[in-house]
Amino acid sequence: MSEKSSIGKAEITRTLEQLGHILEIAGSSPFKVRAFVNGSRALENWQGDLFQLVEDGNVSSIQGIGKGLASIIEDLVQDGQSEAETEIRALIPESLLQILRIAGLGPKKVRAIYEKLEIETIDDLEKACKEELIQSLPGLGKTSENSILKGINNLRRFSGRSLIPNAQSVAERFLASVKDAQGVTKAEIAGSMRRNRETIGDIDVLVASLEPEAVRQAFLSTEGIKEVLAEGETKSRVISEEGMGVDLRVVEPKSFAPALHYFTGSKEHNTRLRQRARDRGWKLNEYGLWNEAGEALSTPEEKDIFSLLDLAWIPPELREDNGEIEWAEKLFAEKKSWNELVTADQIQGVLHCHSTWSDGKATLQEMVQAASDMGWSYYGTADHSRTAAYAGGLSIEQLAEQLLEIQELRKEFPQMTILQGIESDILQDGSLDYPDEVLERLDYVVASVHSSFSMPRKDQTARIEKALRHPCTTVWGHPTGRLLLQRDGYEIDMDHLLKVAAEEGVIVELNAHPRRLDVDWRWGRRIQELGLDVGIHPDAHSTHGLKDVQYGVMAARKMGLSSTQITNCMERDEYLERIKRCHHS
Ligand code: DGT
Ligand code: CA
Ligand code: CA
Ligand code: ZN
């Protein structure tokens, strides 16, 4: 296994997009620029085993990736570097890539700034703005100068994205304050939040009203604004005290549905839909939809836009230009609609929760009480296994003691089925953390990696495969090990391991902790193709942590899953049958 070849698809996707931007700044042909930017997106949306594809010499079979790009991808996968990449990077000073990160500055503007003023760094750009040198450039003006200055400031202070719960609390606050403004007929959160993305860049608030001034005042009087970056008649932008950007857009009530569709995005999805309108001589934008005669078509609801374009309504979560448009086309032709996506009230119980027996903050009794309060009918504890000393992993004796407590709790909570499980570390060699006869006494086993994250891909894959093939493994816990905004997952052959899970009847966990949301939603299509079962588990370490199930449900919706594909939407008896596994001996 080669040590240097540990460059994954996500990184390659980022590289290709960046190369496209570099080419644009350097003044390359638009054709070439587009090949990279579109190729990056094509790769991001493609699901499968990239390493296998490279081995088969088949990269150009991905739609949207030509021969030239394919050979760069092959080099990146095999060697972690590519000569073509080095050549492209040499076209411009590296520091220009930092400038590209400033909000509102795309490659075109960066090119003008670089070409005309020979500016290469953020500090020089800041100076040029203050000396009012930018406003004379084509495509830039006095206002761009101010917005660049603010953008630089923001980049320095708030360059990050946010986890869903943080963004949600900010969004709710702003939404509540504009909802009550005079003249408001509708108000909704759009953007990545409405699409249930795993992290949120900024919050987009969309309001329908004929009195934009009242809305703006209500918006700007929301509590906890750190800075107002822009205030216009229908558009405002602020930074909240939590450091989150919040955009307000006010539209006329008749434009609300097209605006909601537009500002929900994704940008890629929007582009496809606009093209679809254009293909029939129509026009679609955030204000409405017009036919070939230039007549505005009536679109009171989002679904009207879709149906006028011969598409079934697409749930916002799926709008990533990830095959959803083709699917909506097919559904529309068959006069069908989308399968209902899973909802939180369909969850019947959970596995994979911790307690004070290991590193949880609440006792088992408190956890069961809280689970019962959630309205669930089964609850599976899963404390850490003995090797996880740092997390208070349970010895074999402690497991036996815990069972005694569970037997008492079963009497105290007759309405609940209380299961004893374990979150077993997958040891270095892929074995589980107890002898088989101990594992066999448990109701279920979650197998998770908690150590040796940087093993070479092949070894890591073999390690996990061995654990998934163990007859006592019920659930594959947080499959990639990623921590959002903190660390990427370990390198594994995900496609292969999903197939192993399918063969072995192992449940793939959708860990609902908002920092994990692991397995990643981008595997949703593949998981459905393989007919895998997904379990939404809170990995709760406190009673409050049980509520994280809601984020798992959001991610499951983004994967396109219905309740029938989620194991813990099963009624209790069926569920108990499903998780039985370790009774071979
Ligand atoms: P974020 O904020 O980075 O988490 O992601 P979004 O998707 O919320 O992006 P944002 O806030 O920049 O824009 C909100 C939506 O507005 C976006 O999803 C689609 C739409 N939009 C913004 N800029 C463009 C554009 O240049 N073209 C098109 N077609 N749509 C755009
Ligand atoms: Ca946004
Ligand atoms: Ca925005
Ligand atoms: Zn874990």
Image (tube, rainbow, N blue to C red):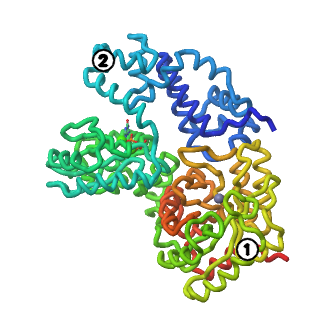
Circle 2 Cα neighbour tier, 10 Å, few/some/many (<14 / 14–19 / ≥20): few
Looking at the image, which is closer to me, 454 or 310?
A: 454
Place residue 78 in its image quadrant: top right
Circle 2 sits in a helix, a strand or a loop, which is it? Answer: helix
Circle 1 sits in a helix, a strand or a loop, which is it? Answer: helix
Query: Disc 1 marks which residue?
Result: 399
From where the camera sits, is residue 273 visible? no
Place residue 113 in its image quadrant: top left
The residue under the point 61% across, 67% down is 354
Looking at the image, which is closer to me, 257 or 413?
A: 413
x, y percentage for residue 42?
A: 56, 39
Looking at the image, which is closer to me, 515 or 411?
A: 411
Q: Amino acid at mark 1?
A: Leu
Figure quadrant, ligand 4: bottom right
From where the camera sits, is residue 83 visible? yes
x, y percentage for residue 424?
A: 72, 63
x, y percentage for residue 103?
A: 38, 31
Looking at the image, which is closer to me, 184 or 222?
A: 222
Task: Identify the disc placed on residue 130.
Answer: 2
Task: Identify the disc placed on residue 251.
Answer: none
Quarter of the image where the N terminus is located: top right
x, y percentage for residue 442?
A: 73, 75
Quarter of the image where the C terminus is located: bottom right
